[in-house]
Image: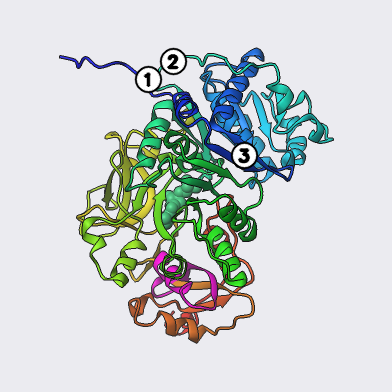
Amino acid sequence: MLGLMQDWPLLVHKIIDHTALYHGDREVVTRSVEGPIERSNYRQIAARARNVSAALEARGIGLGDRVATLAWNTARHLEAWYGIAGIGAIYHTLNPRQFPDQIAWIANHAEDRALFFDIGFADIVARIAPSLQRVEFYVALTDRAHLPDVKIPNLVAYEDFIAGGSGDFSWRQFDEHTACGLCYTSGTTGNPKGVLYSHRSNTLLAMMACRADALGISARDAILPVVPMFHANAWGIAFAAPMAGAKLVMPGAKLDGASLCELFGGEKVTMTAAVPTVWQGVLNHLQETGKTLPHLQRVLIGGAACPRSMIETFEKKYGIEVIHGWGMTEMSPLGTLNTPTAKTAELPYEQRLDSKAGQGRPPFGVEMKIVDGNGRELPRDGVAVGRLKVRGPAVAKSYFRGEGSGAFDGEGWFDTADMGTLDADGMMAITDRAKDVIKSGGEWISSIEIENLAVGHPAVAEAAVIAVRHPKWGERPLLVAILKPGRTATKKDILDHLSGKIAKWWMPDEVVFVDDIPHSATGKIQKTALRERFADYRPPDAERTG
Ligand code: AMP
């Protein structure tokens, strides 16, 4: 017997409708790419999103069409997302930090029919436009006065594009499983792969994100997503903040410590989210200026492992709670969130900090297990390290066009290619990306754990641990570090700092100080590039033991 409750499809434009009705005055503030701070609210965002829908339909865009965006976090970008989704078309976020050729490859692979872009990216668009086979028109996210003077065919200013609308377009109705958004992963092997979110997965994701033990978003919050909308579905914030009626503060193109701190203070931001490298910039700025952030209550840190020392600085020095999170583009992206349980909240502070450095627990809606090399499930004992597999309603079941099928098994599990431990309470800790693991004498060494300890040294700004070949042990860890400006440290200082905190055989054979460590377009350390740089490196005792 079926239940007798209503079919109420989970469509993302219902989120913007809800918030326009019940939180219509709640502000959406943008540091515009043109310069000034601009103020809008959810009522206006919803009406202008309807105008985007109307304008797209007038150009023949409809159900299933991909519409690309190449833009920072702004109110206009948000309107574009909802306007594209509201007619059953698919917002496709392009990452401007990638090389123009890669961007073009991805836009062609997705067969994007239109491209919305920030004026700051006009040169990139002009360069790739001749090779974008399917794009029929371009919308510069600005007004006519700021339209860039570049050669882009069929170009229109966003304000002109939506000018004909009267804010009363009726969203199209369709099944909640309809595709809504598309985001390509950086593609660790082979070409980038498209992750295709549905209206249902995005709506469930927003509900998951709002929970008290996730991001804990409420109508009293003011949220500044530093994480760009082009990085893994904006970590769900573009849906979760309107769903809760939280104020949104969009930082535009300026993501440096000073610019962010100005917005944190000026807009009384209570919650924010970004990768660890961004927080390094913010903490440096606070340190240099002696400023504090009295309104900021919570910081979500993910995308790469958050060092324990960073959590400690935020919490002890600035009284700001850190929520360490782990996820992936393929998971919409929320996977785990580290918020206290009744058990961990009781722990002495140092142990609580240790626990917070882990990646956290899966919320309802994420199933998780670790497996060995033969796919056998490993114990949830906090010790066994295995390959992490996940499933849930906001986890990909396939990549766009069926590529990369090897990552999905017959039981619906997605192989994350991350290695980690799980404990009996569901606490997960990442030890490494599978392709980055260091196997020394047949045993695994966690590069992430050593990196996190190394950046706890007061002179170290950033650290990466990579495997280098060794004739006896197979591989040995090499620590590559950047020192903070004006600070000095020797190999011995760093190794002394690690001593006693890790097993002796985990101790890096060498510490190399460098001026830069390469990062990917989503802020991750590019270990492949580092391994190439140090390919000819031989550990000091290689000759002796070889
Ligand atoms: P992306 O799809 O670009 O968000 O990248 C996802 C990958 O980033 C994951 O598979 C992890 O390897 C890494 N990652 C994300 N968050 C964390 C974290 N908190 N700790 C360690 N690695 C992380």
Residue 365, picture quadrant: top left
> What amino acid does circle 1 point to?
Pro
Q: In this rendering, would 419 be left or right of 111?
A: left
Under circle 3, the secondary element is loop
In the rendered image of this protein, does residue 289 appear above or below residue 2?
A: below
Query: Is label 1 in a helix, a strand or a loop?
Result: loop
Residue named by callout 3 = 74
Residue 110, above or below 278: above
| Count of marks, rendered view | 3
On-image quarter of the N terminus: top left
Q: Nearer the viewer, residue 40 or 238?
A: 40
Label 3 sits on what residue type?
Thr
Q: Residue at x 53, y 75 (%)?
A: 460
Instruction: Identify residue for label 1.
Output: 9
At a point 52% along the width and 83% down the height, the residue shown is 491
Q: Position of residue 342 (x, y in %)?
A: 22, 57
Spatial CA distance of label 1 from label 3 is 28 Å
Q: Position of residue 34 (x, y in %)?
A: 74, 42
Quadrant of the image for the C terminus?
A: bottom left
Label 2 with label 1: CB-CB less than 8 Å: yes
**Residue at 69%, 42% in the rendered image:** 100
Query: Tag on residue 174?
Result: 2
- Classify residue 262 by image quadrant: bottom right
- Region of the chain picked out in magenta, as a range: 447-476
- Residue at 49% from the left image edge and 86% from the top image edge: 492
Mark 2 neighbour class, 10 Å CA radius: few under 14, some 14 to 19, many 20 or more = some
Residue 332 visible within the image: yes
Place of residue 475 in the rendered image (x, y in percent of width and height, measured from the top left):
42, 69
